């Protein structure tokens, strides 16, 4: 997962006007009032902004970092907080809708078991900050209406209770760095970092450990592992060979460029292997300084 906290597309200046009637419709529905014959519940007014989010996310899914164009299920504007209802993923992996092999496909007759828990976050249906672009595989096939919170959902959320919740699903636009909660190995296997609950819930909610996805990550992970080893070797060298370090850094930074598939994994691999604790932006600054040296 690539951290995009500073990269969300700006809300359209007339967004609140555009969604005003749709929000009023949803609020009446939430209060149990009848809707008019011409009213559409949860009218899809967000879909036209898919291109804006695609540009902001470099054409990639906010959860798995696969290019949307490569997903046969296409992409969706995903509601981070489910709008209509919240479901629960049972603890037994047998109910997750996938064979033990971990392959991406599953029998439509054996859908992922996600029982209804409570009503959803209806007032966030038209909240711009609740949107992100997700591939159809992550959004439709796996996440659905799942939304894990610390302590679980005991009743339908309200505006007041929502403000106190501790959401466990990592958000690429959120304030929490995925590198603190996810880890990868050199073949692209994803695991929770230091048994992180956020990492665990994110992985199983969007099924980021599925084998087809791991296979897509593997060549990038192997390449990143090699490039990171080279950078660390150059940083350890005495005396420092600036041209060699500049070259090694350039190759690593290219692989972790935001526009590259699985760039978030590359950055997380660096964070978990770097003994110097050099943050990615500081690596970029160091590379620029080295390039400026004649």
Image (cartoon, grey):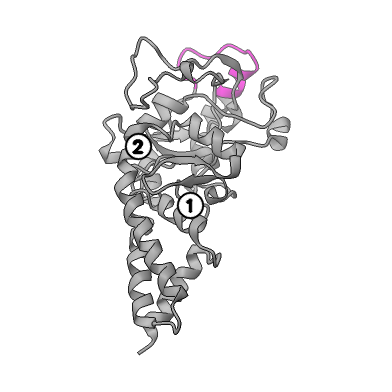
Of residues 42 and 37, the one nearer the viewer is 42
Give the dominant element type of the magenta stretch: helix, strand or loop.
loop
Magenta span: 25-41
Residue 123 is situated, as x and y percent measured from the top left of the image, at 60, 30
* The magenta stretch spans residue 116: no
Residue 4 got which mark? 1
Of residues 205 and 8, the one nearer the viewer is 205
- Residue in the picture at 37% in, 40% down: 50
Please say if 159 is above or below 271.
Answer: above
Please say if 128 is above or below 55.
Answer: above
- Residue in the picture at 42% in, 50% down: 265
Residue 89 is situated, as x and y percent measured from the top left of the image, at 54, 21
Left or right, 251 with respect to 284, comes to left
On the image, numbered disc 2 is attached to which residue? Answer: 213
- Residue in the picture at 45% in, 54% down: 269
Say if residue 262 shows up in the picture: yes
Residue 129, quarter of the rendered image: top right
């Amino acid at each position: 997962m690539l951290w995009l906290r500073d990269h969300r597309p700006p809300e359209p200046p007339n967004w609140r006007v555009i969604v005003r009637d749709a929000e009023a419709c949803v609020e009446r529905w939430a209060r149990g009032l009848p809707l008019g014959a011409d009213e559409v519940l949860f009218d899809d007014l967000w879909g036209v902004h898919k291109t804006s989010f695609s540009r902001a996310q470099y054409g990639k899914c906010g959860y798995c970092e696969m290019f949307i164009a490569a997903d046969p299920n296409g992409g969706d504007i995903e509601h981070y907080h489910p709008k209509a209802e919240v479901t629960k993923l049972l603890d037994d992996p047998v109910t997750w809708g996938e064979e033990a092999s971990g392959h991406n496909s599953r029998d439509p007759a054996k859908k992922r078991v996600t029982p209804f828990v409570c009503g959803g976050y209806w007032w966030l249906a038209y909240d711009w900050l609740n949107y992100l672009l997700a591939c159809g595989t992550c959004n439709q096939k796996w996440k659905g209406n799942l939304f894990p919170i610390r302590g679980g959902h005991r009743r339908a959320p309200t505006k007041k209770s929502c403000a106190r919740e501790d959401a466990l699903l990592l958000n690429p636009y959120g304030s929490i760095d995925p590198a603190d909660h996810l880890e990868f190995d050199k073949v692209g296997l994803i695991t929770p970092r230091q048994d992180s609950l956020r990492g665990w819930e994110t992985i199983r909610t969007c099924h980021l450990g599925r084998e087809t996805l791991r296979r897509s990550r593997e060549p990038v992970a192997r390449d990143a592992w090699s490039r990171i080893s080279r950078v660390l070797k150059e940083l350890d060298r005495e005396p420092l060979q600036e041209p060699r370090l500049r070259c090694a850094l350039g190759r690593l930074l290219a692989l972790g460029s935001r526009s590259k598939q699985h760039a978030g994994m590359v950055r997380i691999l660096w964070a978990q292997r770097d003994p110097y604790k050099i943050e990615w932006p500081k690596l970029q600054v160091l590379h620029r300084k080295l390039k400026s040296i004649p």
